[in-house]
Amino acid sequence: MKIQVLGPLSAEVNGGSIVPTAGKPRQILALLALYPGRVMPVPMLMEEIWGTEPPQSALTTLQTYILQLRRRLGTAMGPDAPGAAKEVLATRHGGYLMQIPPESVDVHEYERMVTQGRSAFEAGDDDGAAGCFRQALELWRGPALVDVRVGPILEIEVMRLEESRLGTVERRIDADLRLGRHSELIAELTELTARHPQHEGLHSQAMVALYRSGRQASALDVYRKLRIRLIEELGVEPSPQVQRLHQAMLAVDPQLDVMAGPRRTSTFDLYAA
């Protein structure tokens, strides 16, 4: 079985899709897939589908949805595996679970690659870190569960995954900056700061990339626009780290040089207290 949640929901067995067309069974499949091998309690599944006010028939309806998923699973597994669907989508006391290896789901492969990248980054293996982060990000095919209606449980999971994705992009850019790829990053960082106009970490990276590319005025302009936006929209000044980064650029601090800067740290923390 192969399940993908980093983009549109996809679940295949022997090359055949088991993703239902109806919205609520899709939610159940997505939630179970995010936690392979873990029992999802019935109350949690019901909350995901109906919120805090499930109908009186909720339990019976949930059981019907599970039965529908098992039928699709059984059809895909074929006649040579009778009863196997109940073993894969199993009933346990108080809930249900998908008995599949974690590596069957793309999010777990993504998280494994991110962990590997972090270890390489901390060890100073910038090239290895950048490669791991890049491989992890290539597993994404769009926003997480983009074609699934999300309830309160899945909504939190989708937010967590999207935050993780952005954080991985930042770490990959950090590794690329440490490798001296600043000029190659400018276009990407221009797009990212436009999409995340209040994100100080990305703006710091854009400033460093521009500065190291000999574009000090453009780097300072990034800070100026960020500061105006934060003051006008949130009523706050940029963080002390970003302010120190700005001052370092005004002073042409040699710490900003790609070879002289500290290793095993993020760009955003370059001037942390």
Image (cartoon, rainbow, N blue to C red):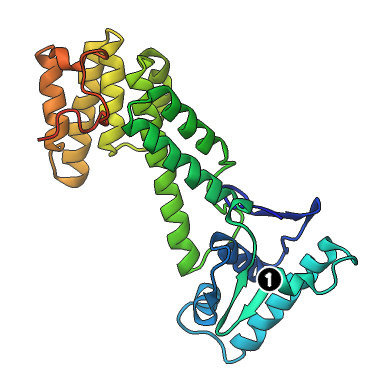
Residue visible at 62% across and 57% down in the picture: 101
Mark 1 is surrounded, within 10 Å at the Cα level, by few (under 14), some (14 to 19) or many (20 or more) other residues, namely many
The quadrant holding residue 221 is: top left
Looking at this view, is 260 or 56 the one in front? 260
From this view, report whether residue 119 is shown above or below residue 259: below
Furthest residue toward right: 79
Q: Is residue 201 left or right of residue 271?
A: right
Q: Secondary structure at mark 1?
A: strand
User: Residue 128 location, x and y as percent?
Assistant: 44, 26
The quadrant holding residue 247 is: top left
Q: Is residue 97 left or right of residue 156?
A: right
Q: Quadrant of the N terminus?
A: bottom right
Residue visible at 81% across and 68% down in the picture: 74
For badge 1, the amino acid type reads: Leu
Furthest residue toward front: 123
Q: Quadrant of the C terminus?
A: top left
Circle 1 sits on which residue?
89
Instruction: Mark yes or no: residue 179 visible.
Output: yes
From this view, report whether residue 56 is shown above or below residue 135: below
Instruction: Mark yes or no: residue 190 visible.
Output: no
User: Residue 203 location, x and y as percent?
Assistant: 28, 30
User: Residue 142 location, x and y as percent?
Assistant: 56, 43
Residue visible at 18% across and 33% down in the picture: 228
